[in-house]
Amino acid sequence: EVQLLESGGGLVQPGGSLRLSCAASGFTFSTYAMSWVRQAPGKGLEWVSTISGSGGTTYSADSVKGRFTISRDNSKNTLYLQMSSLRAEDTAIYYCAKTFNRKADYWGQGTLVTVSS
Amino acid sequence: DIQMTQSPSSVSASVGDRVTITCRASQDINSWLAWYQQKPGKAPKLLIYAASSLQSGVPSRFSGSGSGTDFTLTISSLQPEDFATYYCQQANIFPITFGQGTRLEIK
């Protein structure tokens, strides 16, 4: 059974940093791309970033480019999102998702990031 | 970026009704379209991929069609558990983009 468990969310001040983690199990982690997708309170889904199975290729939304970095540790079956220079508009639930052919076939339960002073 | 536009934004229907949701892409995405269902407080769930392929475990009352720029998600006979928000997503090129969502409510 595929399981994705996000952690690392919380309250952070504007301009601050936070690192999210997503622990994966139930599939061969290194074989699949992984993504982060976020959802602001009461809003729709916004794709954030995707990383290839090897970690050698990444894609990010313009809204986070230069501030967020996606990475993975295949030895630990873990996906990361390093977030810096956080803004109020980054407040959202952040989901990690197993990604195949650019579709998210399994999702974690999400972790809430709140950016506020 | 490819813009995805869903219609309607919300729809009210009754159990047993047939419902169709439309998604339009701002440029040709072939069949690179997925549909997701999201219930309040829960993560999205993949329903349809490649425009018309049913994800494993999804009931057959859900179906998808279309190619190019125009796509539809149809629920043939609404069940109580289908009341949720539905999103389309283009998977043709990065950046990946979602529609704004369609809220399906009980009449």
Image (cartoon, coloured by chain):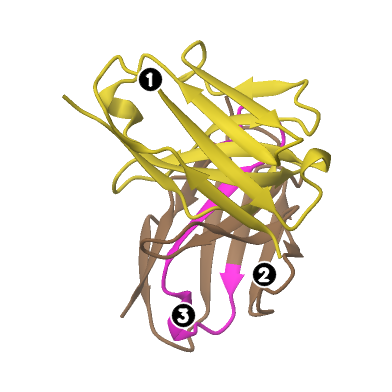
Q: Residue furthest top?
A: A66
Hue used for the chain lettered B: brown
Query: Mark 3 or 2, which is nearer the eye?
Result: 3
For label 1, the residue is A17
For label 2, the residue is B63
Among the chains, which one is yellow? A
How far is the residue under mark 3 from the one under mark 1?
A: 39 Å
Residue B94 in view of the camera: no
Is B51 left, or right, of A97 in this rendering?
Answer: right
User: How many labels, in total?
Assistant: 3
Of residues A49 and B31, the one nearer the viewer is A49
Residue in the image at 47% along x and 20% along y: A64
Residue A40: x, y in percent? 34, 40
Dot 1 alpha-carbon crowd within 10 angstroms: few under 14, some 14 to 19, many 20 or more: some
Amino acid type at mark 1: Ser
Residue A97: x, y in percent? 61, 46
Q: Give the range drawn in magenta.
A: B74-97
Is B14 left, or right, of B48 in this rendering?
Answer: left
Residue B12 included in the magenta stretch of the image: no
Amino acid type at mark 3: Glu
Q: Mark 3 lies on which chain?
A: B
**Image quarter of residue A59:** top right
For label 3, the residue is B81
Dot 3 alpha-carbon crowd within 10 angstroms: few under 14, some 14 to 19, many 20 or more: few
Label whose residue precedes the other's in the sequence (3 or 2): 2
Query: What kind of element bears circle 2?
Result: strand
Residue in the image at 74% along x and 61% along y: B52
Is A114 left, or right, of B45 in this rendering?
Answer: left
